[in-house]
Image (tube, rainbow, N blue to C red):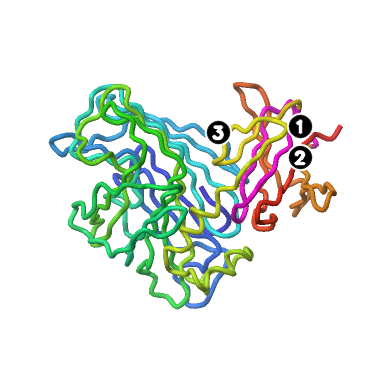
Amino acid sequence: AALGSWGETICFDSDVNLQRSMIDDVRPLMVWSMNNNFPRKWAWTNNVGGGDFLVYHDPAGKKQWNSRMKTSYRRIGPNLSEVTYAGTTAKEKIDLSCTAQLMRSDDYVRILYHLRYDVRQEAEYSRLAFFQLGADRYNDHTFGLIARGNAKGLIEEWEPERGGKRYSRTGIECVGQAPWFSLHEGHSRDESNSGAWANRGLVIRSWRARLGGRESHVPFVSVYGTENGSYKSANVELAPPPGLVRLLPGDFVEATLVQLTLPQFAEDYYGPNRGLQEVLPEMENSWRLVHREAAGNAPRVTVSVGNLESEHPIRIRAQGDRAEFALEGGLAHAPVTLSGLSTYREPVLEQESEAVWKGLDQAVHGRDFWQTDFDPITKTWEITWNVGLDSLEPGGAENRFRFRMEP
């Protein structure tokens, strides 16, 4: 998937044909292009990729590859893309479904994952990771520090053990609202004068699981030392609770994660987002941008006409082709999808400002700022806008919107 003109925003290899990982190249946006001695816009940026879903090794240490993978393209963009990768593990012990969504923005890359794993047969393991930020066979990105926290702030920051193909930390309990991890102080491999690098982050937006036949109310994380060729680094893994060695039929994991690709320094970012421009000088190359995302980018949604179907991303089912809702908080732009529509013609989204309703207009070449998709199951239409959240009034003020169809 590509967001703008910076190359591959993120690449997926669901069958792992390259023998590396399901998540391959990952690149930042709105930063200077790679391998240039002079600052250059709108070109390929450096790769800080690598990641994986459901890494499962049997008791003998043999990797159980995911198989029978199928890809379903639900929506292709440009405001919100949605693709699901689904299959099963070797011997059909665990079914997996990973939905990835990339949203339009003007500050940095956010990739939203919805994970669902269902255990069909007893599965004993020597190693298990539900998600990896930095994969065993793809983690060229080396960095100085890891930090973790939640919406309230920083819990700890440390220098990880790099390489060794072993765990340096296990059983890290992720308490509080919106647990997050930051992999920062990235070591750039770009030897040019202007090629920008990037840092990475992970936010856990929701978690629900039954593991070993018991409810697992909070996620756990481990840190593993990777060796990708000559690059010795470390990753962050979403893991089972410590002491657990087998999964039982009926166990499951359901989680929503946000992967972040962040500009490293203020001088690297040339995008138009004023909110990011203001905070980057004091937050650059640190955990603070990830905490800002975790704490500040969960807009509260109140629906007065229609029904709220999802908060991550925001999805509202209209009533009679109409909807009214209010948003509070958030960063940059958020995709808002109106579903259950009888038609796609003449949609209007309005925002209330000083008791006056004004139509949302982001047009560049006319009617080009909303996205239309058809749901073949319900035989209804869906329309997605990207609503600017930085400009919304802070401090609990209602930022009201209404949707209708022009007659």
Stretch in magenta = 321-346
In the image, taking residue 365 as reference, residue 25 lies left or right, namely left
Q: Quadrant of the C terminus?
A: top right
Q: Residues within 10 Å of mark 1 (few under 14, many from 20)?
A: some
Considering only order in the chain, which callout, 1 or 3, is on the residue closer to the N terminus?
3
Q: Which residue carries the number 2 mark?
A: 402
Considering only order in the chain, which callout, 1 or 2, is on the residue closer to the N terminus?
1
Residue 326 counted in the magenta span: yes
Disc on res. 74: 3
Q: Distance between the residues labelled 3 and 1?
A: 23 Å
Residue 395 counted in the magenta span: no
Compared to residue 278, the image places residue 262 above or below, namely above
Q: Which residue carries the number 1 mark?
A: 322
> What amino acid is at disc 3?
Arg
Compared to residue 167, the image places residue 44 above or below, namely below
Q: Distance between the residues labelled 3 and 2?
A: 25 Å
